[in-house]
Image (cartoon, helix red, strand yellow):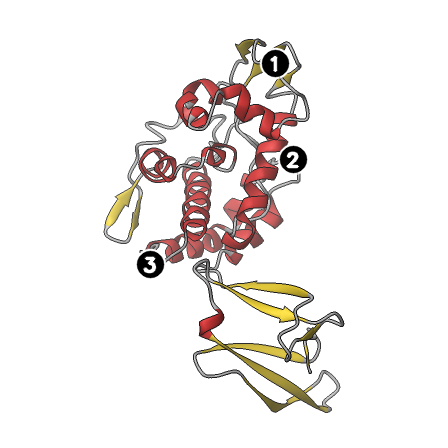
Amino acid sequence: MKYLSALIITIIFTSSCSAAQKTLQNDSNGNVEVRNTIEIPSTTTNANNAIEISLGEDGTISDNGITETTETIYTEAFDHSILNNLLQKFVSANGNVDYKGLKGDYKTLQSYIELLKTNQPKDDWTKNDKLAYWINAYNALTIDLILRNYPTKSIKDIKDPWDQRLWKLGDNWQNLNDIEHKILRSMDEPRIHFAIVCASISCPKLQNTAFTASKLEDQLTNATKEFLADTTKNELSEEQIKISRIFKWFKKDFETNGSLIDFLNQYSDVKISNSAKKSFKDYDWNLNE
């Protein structure tokens, strides 16, 4: 048995056959520690950039083919850690953004945008990798737009905020409208509307963690549920709903696999009747700070 332990095992992705070898490493006290290095063949990688390791009942890698559990290790196509650190530092749990603080750390945001510019999604990226890239790009570029014009009371006080082509990603000058309508909406994932943020109070909250391919399903589901549960943005009951204008503007996106009520019932704690009366809330475009 080869023991799978975060303390003693280093996992290496390689195209060679599975093998184990011992390496020496100094610990924090200067002592030499023997570590087992397990090499995992690339043939275990599936179409979603994930490898599956069979584990025995005691948590060890199974040699005899008997699998009690399976651990999946996902290889992200793009590193969003710079953005994640910024969001953790300057965005509250409620989605309020410290734009003044971000302005003071503007170079770090620019370093993330530089990565976006030079590392475009490739054809062999998974759908989740592409979605995470473009969702994070949209949010980062929106923050950048606000900071270029800060202080401002609203994104709508900026001239043509969604049409300015300020960022050259690869060979193309992008604006926010193209990212949202030509790229993200074409990927058949209506929950993106609760992940991308227009820097306004009535928008879905800006999450204080970056989206990643390996966690995207849970992140999109949680963002959708949070938005629907926020009574400042949606008021839901069995017989009457007063909902965000997002559901009016992008009605077709939410009706690709049924009615709007069907979509809402997938993510709402309230069971809404198909005959429920519907109205839309006013949209507050004041800055989300």
For the question of whether residue 284 can be seen, the reply is: no
Q: Earlier in the sequence, mark 1 or mark 2?
A: 2
Residue pointed to by mark 3: 118
Closer-to-camera residue (281/20): 20
Horizontal and vertical percent position of residue 52: 56, 66
Q: Spatial distance from mark 1 to mark 3, Cα to Cα?
A: 48 Å
Q: Quadrant of residue 256?
A: top left
Q: Earlier in the sequence, mark 2 or mark 3?
A: 2
Q: Quadrant of the N terminus?
A: bottom right
Closer-to-camera residue (116/101): 116
Horizontal and vertical percent position of residue 231: 66, 21
Q: Spatial distance from mark 1 to mark 2, Cα to Cα?
A: 30 Å
Residue 94 numbered tag:
2
Q: Secondary structure at mark 1?
A: loop
Horizontal and vertical percent position of residue 162: 35, 31
Kind of residue indicated by mark 1: Ser
Q: Are marks 1 and 2 in contact (CB under 8 Å)?
A: no
Q: Check the image and report above or below for 234 versus 114.
A: above
Horizontal and vertical percent position of residue 122: 32, 57
Q: Residue at x 43, y 21 (%)?
A: 251
Residue 273 numbered tag:
1
